[in-house]
Amino acid sequence: MKLLPRFAALLAAVSLYFSPACAQHSDAVRLNQVGFYPTAPKIAVVVTETGGRFEVKEAKSGKIALKGTLGEMRTSQHSGKHTRLADFSALRKPGTYVIEVAGVGKSAAFGINDHVHRNVAEAALKGFYYQRASINLPEKYAGKWARPAGHPDERVLIHASAVSDGRPENAVISSPRGWYDAGDYNKYIVNSGITMGTLLSLYEDYSLYFEDFNTNIPESNNGVPDLLDEVAWNLRWMLTMQDPADGGVYHKLTNPRFDGMIMPDAAKNPRYVVQKSTAATLDFVAVMAQASRVFKNFDNKFPGLADSCITSAVRGWQWAEKHPAVMYNQDAMNKEFDPDVATGTYGDRSVKDEWIWAACEMYAATGKAEYIEKIGLELHQPMTLPTWSQVKTLGYYTLLRFDEAVKLPAGQADTLRKNVLSYANDLLRNLETQPYHTVMGKTPRDYAWGSSSVAANQGIALLYAYRLSKDKKYLHAALGNLDYLLGRNATGYCFLTGFGSKRVMHPHQRISIADGIVDPVPGLLSGGPNPGQQDKCAGYPNKFADESFTDNDCSYASNEIAINWNAPMVYLVAALEATMK
Ligand code: 9MR
């Protein structure tokens, strides 16, 4: 009995050591745990029914910088829980602060300054470096996460489903480089597609910002923006995924089964490229067309790359014309061929949206209107948010970006603009009643597998609306979704590893699980709440859509990381940094 208080004290000390900031601050005060721009809205959300007063204080001196009163009570449509807003937007002086709510407690320290998310943007892009296959990560670039190269992928086998002229079953091809998809070590063309499209669009939309953006990777200071050096790592892998015999693109490069929770260099299972699919080929076409535009300006650094990209894109397009709807159906494939493959499917039911995206990128790259004329743009339909299986909006963004140059038929450019604005207006509707004052999370549908990417992609859509209209309400809502990702949400977590006072420490990512280092690999975006809870992991607090998250490495359904989630995170935070500058 006597030991108990001591044990409790020890426990407290241990938890203080592992989460230093959490120990003194209240989990009921939810805010962007990194900080705010001087001229932007600044909102903390307090999980409370009771009204009252709050104070923002300078972190060091404790001097009061602003006093305020909590707003009206709001109620979560997901959990029925109550919240109130602490709005301290009037505080514009750069510094480091805490917010203290009477009767509730205080937050950890956060910043207010002009480039408050710069290191978040750098880390999120650097996250891709840590996902690189086939390369040694030395300490100079990787710090304590240094590790030997894994998956050289120089001897990849042709799966029985993928045989073609000159490539019989078990023939060996070389397909090195690329990024690991997620917590697993496989490389999937479909998911690389949206990831690359998002990163290349970020470059096309904000190229100036990347002139001076260093992430300390081996290629830094080579005269090419680090963003593009990183993209090139995956681009070169993607190029190897095209069958030279016919221009079709293999759906994925994969183990038959997922590797165990081991480091990349310990993984020795054979790897295969599997059957070609129309979705993979069209995503490839879109990426190659866009990359050809971007890398044309760096031909001295990447001789011939832009040409290879457009040639590959044209060949891919021709293959897709001959095979307009070859779906990837893993179960059917396994019935016909061995070995069976059990890794991620990225299977799609319709490739209409892939056709549209590829057509838009081909049109923007070549100026040949026949690409979009053949396909039809479906502009009468409301805009949809990009996901790996729904990519047409990436094409629309491209048409908008080159509006002046690409000359759409009369009325179509207007319709595109209207569709983006009407999508953004729908997002903004009822913002004033939302429990966390974010457009993210209005409906349970937002909490799909990888919900963090929904928040980030909504933010990107809002930024397009802002660029079209110059109306700050869209910019502020985009910032609100960044606030969501960095802590103003129903879980209280900051979802980007390496950041926040309530951090994700146990993502479902093989490297972070196996490396024996306490801190997870930084700059990776956790998937976020997903009431599907498909992993059946222990630790979910409840079934509420907005709280269905557990920082547990068994939780691949709520706490995995993935390149298609990191890319919109990089886009959102870098674009906001560029805009707020
Ligand atoms: O992001 C994908 C999600 O939309 C699907 O619902 C889920 C189940 O099929 O798969 C997710 O993608 C995973 C992929 O299949 C394999 N690598 C990890 C990805 C993220 O969990």
Image (cartoon, grey):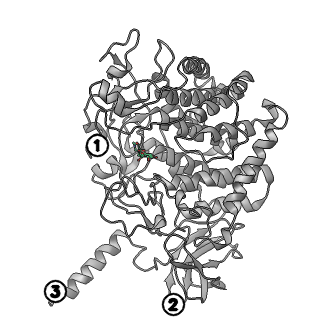
SS of the residue under disc 3? helix
Q: Which one is nearer the viewer's eye here, 482 or 381? A: 381
Q: Position of residue 317 (x, y in %)?
A: 59, 21
Q: Looking at the image, tell me whether mark 3 or mark 2 is earlier in sequence order.
A: 3
Task: Report the disc number at residue 103.
Answer: 2
Q: Amino acid at mark 2?
A: Gly
Q: Looking at the image, tell me whether mark 2 or mark 1 is earlier in sequence order.
A: 2
Image quadrant in which the C terminus is located: bottom right
Q: Which one is nearer the viewer's eye here, 470 or 356? A: 356
Q: Amino acid at mark 3?
A: Leu
Q: Position of residue 505 (x, y in %)?
A: 37, 61
Residue displayed at 51% across by 17% down: 247
Mark 3 vs mark 2, CA separation in Å: 32 Å
Other residues around mark 2 within 10 Å, as few (<14) / some (14–19) / many (≥20): few
Q: Relative to 89, does residue 537 appear above or below in the rendering?
A: above
Q: Is residue 322 left or right of residue 150?
A: right
> From this viewpoint, is residue 224 visible?
no
Q: Relative to 352, does residue 95 appear above or below in the rendering?
A: below
Depth check, mark 2 against mark 1: the one in front is 2
Mark 2 vs mark 1, CA separation in Å: 47 Å
> From this viewpoint, is residue 531 visible?
yes
- In the rendered image, which residue does mark 3 sit on? 3
Residue displayed at 66% across by 50% down: 461
